[in-house]
C-alpha cells in the first residue's frame, strides 16, 4: 500500500531535482580530470589572495581553528546526477574572505586547485553563506578522490564549480574562464536554469 506520507516524501524529493537531473541515490560518482594527488597535511595550505587588503594563508591546523560550518543538502553534477542529503563540514568562505577583506574592485573569484584545475565564480556566489571549504563528508575525512584533504563546495551551482584539492581563492576584478569554462561549460552554471554549456 502506498501511504500519503510516502507520496509526500517522493514529491518533495522531485521538487528538489533541477530540470534534466536524476537521483543518483547512495552512489557518489567520481569525476576528475587529473590524477588524485597524494594528501600531504604537513605542507597543505589554503590561501586567499589577489584583490584583498591582506593575503592570508592557513595551514591544516590553522584552518581547523576557525569557526566551523556544515552544509546539509543536495549537490548537482552537470552530467545529470544529483545527490540528496549530503553533509559536508568545513569553514564558510565568508570566514576566509572576512580575514583577507576583498578590495572594493574585487568582483569575481578564481578557485585554484593544487593540481592546476581552476573554476571561476562571481564573488556574490561564494558569499552570504553559500560556499565552503570542506574536509569532512558524512562525519568522515573527505576521501582523496572526492577532493580530500579539502575541496571547495558551492552546492547551489553545478558541481564542477566545487574545485577538488582546493588551495587558493584569487579575487579578481574581471571574470575569466576556468578549466571547464574554457572548454565550453557555462560561465555560471545554475542547475535550476540548466546553465550547462555555453550557447
Ligand atoms: N580539481 C578538480 N576539481 C573538480 C573536478 C576536477 O576534474 N578536478 N571536476 C569537477 C566536476 S566536473 C565535478 S562533477 C565534481 C566531481 O566531484 P566528485 O568527483 O567528488 O563527485 O568535481 C569538480 N571539481
Ligand atoms: Mo561534473
Image (cartoon, grey):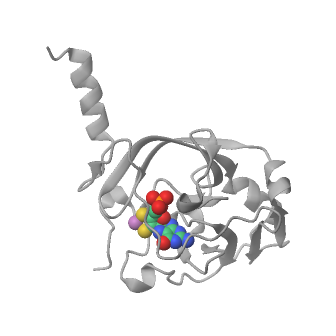
Looking at the figure, which quarter contains the N terminus?
Answer: top left
Please, is residue 78 above or below residue 179 in the view?
A: above
Left or right, 123 with reference to 50: left
Q: x%, y% of residue 102? A: 74, 69
Please, is residue 68 above or below residue 106 in the view?
A: above
The structure residue drawn at horizontal position 69% and vertical position 70%, both measured from the top left corner, is 167
Please, is residue 58 above or below residue 178 in the view?
A: above
Between 14 and 44, which is closer to the camera in this rendering?
44
Q: x%, y% of residue 36? A: 57, 69
Between 129 and 2, which is closer to the camera in this rendering?
2
Between 106 and 162, which is closer to the camera in this rendering?
162
One can see residue 49 in this view: yes
The structure residue drawn at horizontal position 41% and vertical position 51%, both measured from the top left corner, is 28
Q: Quadrant of residue 8?
A: top left
The structure residue drawn at horizontal position 58% and vertical position 54%, both measured from the top left corner, is 143
From this viewpoint, which residue is outermost toward the left? 1
Q: Quadrant of residue 145?
A: bottom right
Q: x%, y% of residue 135? A: 66, 52
Looking at the figure, which quarter contains the C terminus?
Answer: bottom left
Q: x%, y% of residue 4? A: 21, 16
Left or right, 69 with reference to 42: left
One can see residue 160 in this view: no
Amino acid at each position: 500500500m502506498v501511504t500519503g506520507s510516502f507520496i509526500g516524501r517522493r514529491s518533495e524529493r522531485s521538487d528538489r531535482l533541477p530540470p534534466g537531473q536524476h537521483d543518483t541515490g547512495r552512489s557518489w560518482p567520481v569525476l576528475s580530470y587529473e590524477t588524485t594527488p597524494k594528501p600531504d597535511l604537513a605542507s597543505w595550505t589554503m590561501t586567499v589572495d589577489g584583490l584583498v587588503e591582506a593575503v592570508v594563508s592557513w595551514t591544516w591546523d590553522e584552518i581547523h581553528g576557525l569557526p566551523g560550518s556544515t552544509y546539509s543538502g543536495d549537490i548537482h553534477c552537470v552530467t545529470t546526477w544529483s545527490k540528496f542529503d549530503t553533509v559536508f563540514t568545513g569553514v564558510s568562505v565568508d570566514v576566509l574572505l572576512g580575514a583577507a577583506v576583498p578590495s572594493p574592485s574585487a568582483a569575481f573569484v578564481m578557485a585554484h586547485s593544487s593540481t592546476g584545475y581552476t573554476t571561476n565564480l562571481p564573488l556574490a556566489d561564494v558569499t552570504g553563506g553559500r560556499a565552503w571549504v570542506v574536509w569532512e563528508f558524512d562525519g568522515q575525512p573527505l576521501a582523496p578522490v572526492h577532493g580530500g584533504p579539502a575541496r571547495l563546495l558551492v552546492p547551489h551551482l553545478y558541481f564542477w564549480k566545487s574545485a577538488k584539492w582546493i588551495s587558493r581563492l584569487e579575487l579578481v576584478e574581471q571574470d575569466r574562464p576556468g578549466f571547464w569554462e574554457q572548454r565550453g561549460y557555462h560561465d555560471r552554471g545554475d542547475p535550476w536554469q540548466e546553465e550547462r554549456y555555453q550557447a
